[in-house]
């Protein structure tokens, strides 16, 4: 049943669904690590939340580039011109970083909420945006 449903949706859509599944798997692990690291550094090391996210972003951008290139989008797009892909990857990740900083600024700095509040949209909003941008502009 599942197999026949996959065949009926077309090769391009099927490839995108598998990419989405791989991205979800790798991205979920990375996203959880980012959110947990951000929160732990803010909460237990008393680092300003926006600085904490900056530290975490720098480390996990490299992890994310390798994981998504080798795993999530392994069969999608050309694999030449690494410098161009890396530039687009950084642009997408910086946009995701700015979105997450916006969550921190709004929820922690402006609304004076706890440092864990931004982890909710970091996990459920930002990955949807970055998946679409990675698929469309980075690994196309």
Image (spheres, grey):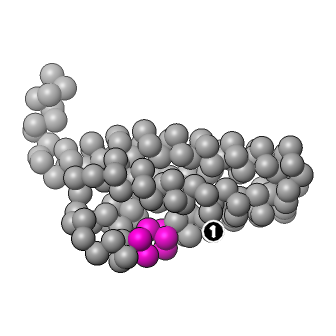
The image quarter in which residue 88 lies = bottom left
Per the rendered image, the range of residues in magenta is 86-92
Q: Which residue is drawn at 21% across and 66% down?
A: 78
The spot of residue 14 in percent (x, y) is 19, 44
Residue at 10% over, 37% down: 7
Mark 1 secondary-structure assignment? helix
Residue with the most extreme top position:
1
Q: How crowded is mark 1: few (under 14 residues within 10 Å), some or many (20 or more)?
A: some
Image-quadrant location for residue 95: bottom right
Residue 41 seen in the figure: yes
Q: Is residue 138 left or right of residue 35?
A: left
The image shows residue 98 at horizontal and vertical percentages of: 63, 68
40 left or right of 76 in image = right
Q: Where is residue 127 in the image (x, y as percent from the top left)?
A: 50, 52
Q: Is residue 91 magenta?
A: yes
Classify the position of the N terminus by image quarter. Answer: top left
Task: Report the quarter where the C terminus lies.
Answer: bottom left
Residue 29 in the image: state x and y as whole percent. Answer: 52, 40
* Image: 135 above or below 87: above
Residue named by callout 1: 98
Q: Residue at x 27, y 42 (%)?
A: 18
Q: Does the magenta stretch include residue 26?
A: no
Looking at the magenta stretch, what is its main secondary structure? helix
User: In the picture shown, does residue 35 fall above or below 57?
Assistant: above
**Would residue 102 be found to the left or right of residue 97 on screen?**
right
């Amino acid at each position: 049943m599942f197999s026949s449903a996959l065949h009926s949706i077309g090769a391009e859509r099927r490839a995108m669904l598998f990419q989405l599944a791989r991205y979800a798997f790798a991205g979920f692990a990375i996203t959880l690590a980012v959110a947990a690291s951000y929160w732990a550094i803010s909460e237990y090391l008393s680092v300003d939340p926006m600085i904490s996210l900056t530290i975490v972003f720098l480390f996990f951008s490299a992890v994310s580039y390798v994981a998504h290139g080798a795993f999530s989008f392994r069969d999608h797009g050309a694999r030449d011109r690494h410098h161009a892909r890396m530039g687009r990857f950084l642009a997408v990740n910086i946009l995701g970083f700015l979105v997450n900083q916006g969550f921190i600024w709004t929820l922690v700095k402006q609304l004076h909420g706890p440092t864990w509040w931004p982890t909710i949209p970091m996990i459920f909003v930002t990955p949807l945006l970055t998946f679409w941008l990675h698929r469309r502009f980075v690994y196309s």
